[in-house]
Image (tube, rainbow, N blue to C red):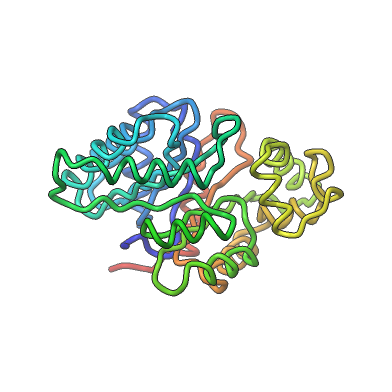
Amino acid sequence: MPLGRYGIWTFDFEDQPASLIRDSARELEEHGWPALWIPERDGREALTHAGFLLSVTERLTVVNGIAQIWSREPRWTRGAALLLADAYPDRHLLGLGFSAGKPGTKPLQAMNGYLDAMDAVTSANPTAPIRRLLAAYGPKMLELARDRSAGAHTYHVTPEHTAQAREVLGDGPFLGVEHAVVFETDAAKAREIAREHLHLYLTSKYNLAKFRRLGYSEADIDGGRGSDRIVDDLVFWGDLETISGKLRDHLDAGADHVAIQVIGLEPGKSAMPHWRRLAEALLPVTA
């Protein structure tokens, strides 16, 4: 998949007007970013959001990271993804995830059932293939991603987890890793920003299970505050050189692609200055 080694992962477009989203996406493309990852929270519907971003750019690959399986029925997810694959060949990647899920529902069972339902639909035969990947952390979901999609998307993990995920996936499937960064060299300030960002994840059921599998103790989780150890592992902070070096650790551990989430921005401020700096440091120079 033509995603390059680095991309941008952002919540920023969830609340912005369409004109600003359009201008930002075009500027990212101009700076050479090959891929843009968008979540589905509560601001934008995932597939229409992806379609808009594809329509205002020419080369950028847009990745749903992720579209929640609870947000739409499988047949409509398939239908939307078919249209995007046909209209923008090789530029859309459908990432699917369990997210918060539903009470009493097991993630693996729910995802398997969702994929079964998508694959059972025979109307609207594809003119171009749908490319999909799964949000996956534990071995069983990674195996499902390996067997029933193009690969896996991980979020808030360490290079050690990336190495483990690569071992489960094997050599062929795609592994895309998100990692958050803060451009702040003062440790206390950087960790304060990181803790605010991580609090939601350090207090949610499925993320806590993931962190425990990664070897973090209850002292590291610290009631949702997070120890310095877990904060520093999950959010890279410092100057451009330091951050760039740590991001490369994921590639060295077996990731095909690292999607960078810049956090710690003041309200109303754009991440574009940081995206420009990262492009200069990480992206290949083109003629």
Q: Is residue 194 above or below residue 41?
A: below
**Residue lying farthest right?**
219
Establish if 80 lies above or below 143: above
The residue located at (78%, 39%) in the rendering is 224
Number of numbered callouts drawn: 0
State the quadrant of the N terminus: bottom left
Who's the residue at 45% across and 36% down the image?
68
Q: Is 219 placed left or right of 101 in the picture?
A: right
Snapshot quadrant of residue 146: bottom left
- The picture quadrant where one finds residue 77 is top left
Q: Position of residue 202 (x, y in %)?
A: 72, 41
Q: Name the spot of residue 243 as percent of width and height, x first.
A: 62, 60
Residue 133 percent coordinates (x, y): 40, 53
Q: Residue at x 70, y 57 (%)?
A: 213
Q: Nearer the viewer, residue 110 or 236?
A: 110
Quarter of the image containing the C terminus?
bottom left
Name the foreground residue: 120 vs 78. 120
101 or 21: nearer the viewer: 101
Q: Which residue is at 54% across, 28% downward?
A: 268
Q: Is 140 above or below relative to 86?
A: below
Residue 174 appears left or right of 81: right
Residue 263 as seen in the image, left or right of residue 92: right
Compared across the picture, whether 78 is left or right of 149 comes to left
Q: Position of residue 31 (x, y in %)?
A: 37, 54
Front position in the image: 63 or 100: 100
